[in-house]
Amino acid sequence: MTVARECLGKVLVHGSTAGRIVEVEAYLGLADRASHAFRGPTSRARVMFGPPGHAYVYFIYGMYECVNFVTERDGTAGAVLIRALEPLAGLATMQRRRPKARRVEDLASGPGKLTLAMGITRKLNGADLVAGPLTLRAQREEPAFETAVGPRIGITHCAAWPLRFSVAGSGFVSG
């Protein structure tokens, strides 16, 4: 949960696109029935059991890819789903990739939307978030914000757990 909160306000960069993370959800590995790691290190979830600081990218609903950050030490599963971004760079590229988005607030306001907008695919599964093509950076001056806490959404197991964190009042969250 600590890492999930600390991801808020950081900047995710891929190619010419970048966005400030405004919404995340924590997934607690083997103890969390909603986590892909719940059944152990399957071929799909193996990255979640690897070293922290890597991307776990998976396909969902037969149409979207989602990006998570692996957060626990090697051998222990845990991840943070990146749910929404405030676009900062590459807006024209994001708009081209998401032509149905009418407002900048809609470009990356959901886990599938942000991967489309930023061109994040399963090819980045396992990518190092420090030295890879997908990087996580701190802003030089991070603006102060309050953190809103609520239940995770879009899942059936353990949905009521207060593991969804967002920048309070941000117009870029998924809703």
Image (cartoon, grey):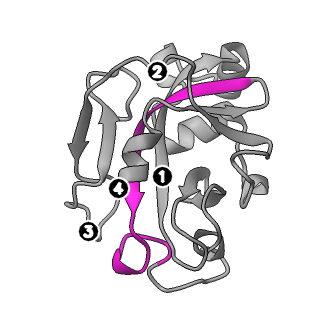
Q: Callout 1: helix, strand or loop?
A: strand
Q: Amino acid at mark 4?
A: Met
Which residues, given as a range, are shown in magenta? 17-37
Q: Amino acid at mark 3?
A: Cys
Q: Amino acid at mark 2?
A: Glu
Q: Is residue 15 left or right of residue 151?
A: right
Relative image position of residue 150 (x, y in whole percent): 21, 46
- Which residue corresponds to mark 4? 1
Between marks 4 and 1 in the image, the one whose residue lies nearer the viewer: 4
Between marks 1 and 2 in the image, the one whose residue lies nearer the viewer: 2
Residue at 31% x, 23% y: name it.
145
Q: CA distance from mark 1 to mark 2?
A: 21 Å
Whether label 4 touches label 1, CB < 8 Å: no
Q: Quadrant of residue 130?
A: top right
Per the rendering, the mark at residue 142 is 2
Q: Callout 3: helix, strand or loop?
A: loop
Q: Quadrant of the N terminus?
A: bottom left
The first of marks 3 and 2 along the sequence is: 2
Q: CA distance from mark 4 to mark 2?
A: 20 Å
The first of marks 1 and 3 along the sequence is: 1
Relative image position of residue 171 (x, y in whole percent): 35, 20
The first of marks 1 and 2 along the sequence is: 1
Neighbourhood count class around disc 1 (C-alpha, 10 Å): few under 14, some 14–19, many 20 upward: many
Relative image position of residue 49 (x, y in whole percent): 59, 75
The total number of labels drawn is: 4
Q: Amino acid at mark 1?
A: Leu
Residue at 33% x, 22% y: name it.
170
Q: Callout 2: helix, strand or loop?
A: loop
Between marks 4 and 3 in the image, the one whose residue lies nearer the viewer: 4
The first of marks 4 and 3 along the sequence is: 4
